[in-house]
Amino acid sequence: MKKLLILIVTFVAVTASAQQEPPPRKSIELSGGRAADFPVGPFTDSWESLKDNYKTPQWFIDAKFGIFIHWGVYSVAATGSEWYPRHMYGALLKHHTENWGNPKKFGYKDFIPLFTAEKFDPDTWATLFKEAGAKYVIPTAEHHDGFALYDSKLTRWDAKDMGPKRDLIGDLAKAVRRQGIKFGVSNHRMEHWDFMYPTAATEHDLYDPEYADFYGPPQKPDKNKASAMGPSAEEVMEGKEAPQDQGFLEEWLARCQEIIDKYQPDILWFDNGINSRSLDPLKLRLAAYYYNRAAQWDKPVSLSTKHDAYLYGTITDYERQGRAPKDITSHYWQVDEPIGNKFGYIEGLQIQSSSQIISKLVENISRNGNLCLNISPKADGTIPENQQEVLRQIGHWMKINGEAVYGTHAWMVYGEGPTVEKNKSEFDWRFTQKDKSTFYAYMMKWRGGKVVIKSFNIVNLGKIKKVELLGYDKHIKFVQTDEALEIVLPSENPNINISVVKVEI
């Protein structure tokens, strides 16, 4: 009986510890309790202003291919995913304890000194991105973990003061822009509110007041409010408010303003955490600040957000290819797609082939979308060789076929083939158009000999004067009928990936 009583008391104590309420969230003190007002300019903090004044930058429309980068303190653990700081206090607690120790003694903060980035060479990165054919680059300035990769005056928990002891974002911005590539940043701080709340750890460092300005501390998710990670469809329908308090929200805006002023990003990307409708007043202040600053810089910029976080004034982003639009859209958008099975670097990351990635790029541009390919550097600042090789292969393809990518837009139909419901054919094609007389047909699955493009007939295209296969220096025979364009292609594909037929009328 005595042993049973001890077990019961121990169980109750452990349960109580696991359910301990966190201390209140700690936010930085701002002058007047608010972030700075937005500067005078064409934009105000209203949807009408965004609707009337915003225009998708032409550079984005023409770019088609960008690089996204998930790199941070979580890259040290190299386990699970970039959500390691969340799961080390939850689902990965056993792994963390066995490999790093009790999170009370070795918490997430203790990874920071190990995030040295000692081999990080921004010029080498930028050269690789240029070789890959990327026209813009978006690194994570701050992920859900709350550690800033830039030099911030609003927190000591940044890469300039800790870990690498350098401004990683600033250094990369300079290198990328030297290559003539547009530079943006992503900011995931909104999700930090309750991201690292302990779901399994009964002993941890998350509520230690010494680290409150880093951990928050993380708040307990509120079942009566929308998720800090972004509201579900049900939460939106129910009109649930975001859980963050006003102090946190004003700090979030101040941090965004700091990034805007310091790095003048060409694109500013946000994750699902800002999707809640209750955050609209704050988001409109951010948009007015960013776009009016850009007007002062005299440069076209854009926000990029998910779902309907912004009703106007943004480039819609879709996480992973499976969520991309399946037909041509009137608006321009992008997909952020990881090169591997995770966004952040992990041991044993499963890498996509260049053929898989190019296929997704083509699917997107045929529908008025872009592809922003995420890469996963290691904690030491190196990009793994297998990722580099894929990027180089994409770049090789771009050198041959880039004219069919950059500066093009969707045609009247995005494609025809076995999987295209409206335009079924035995041949699998996707289409883009560059101007009134130049069209491109991407052969998704190679077929040598006589092939046909039913969509390219006299009725909807006009008289064809020239057909060529990009990267193939021999003459291509063709016949245009009222029903189709008939082409004779070489038996062997001259390209290791998708080949492109250029048609001029």
Image (spheres, grey):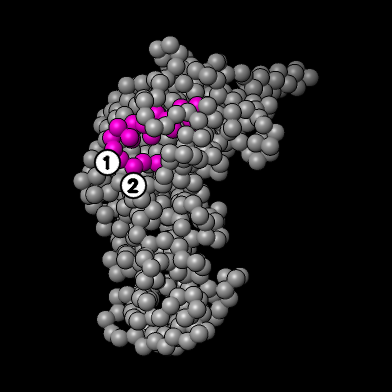
Q: Secondary structure at mark 2?
A: strand
Q: Amino acid at mark 1?
A: Leu
Q: Mark yes or no: residue 280 visible.
A: yes
Which residue is pictured at 28% across the width and 35% down the height? Answer: 297
Q: Read off the magenta span.
A: 282-302
Residue 295 x/y as whole percent: 33, 35
Say which residue label 2 marks.
Answer: 137
Residue 487 x/y as whole percent: 42, 85
**Above or below, 197 relative to 233:** above
Which residue is pictured at 32% across the width and 54% down the height? Answer: 134
Say which residue label 1 marks.
Answer: 172
Which residue is pictured at 41% across the width and 64% down the height? Answer: 358
Q: Amino acid at mark 2?
A: Val
Residue 386 x/y as whole percent: 35, 58
| Mark 2 or 1, nearer chain start | 2
**Above or below, 125 relative to 33:** below
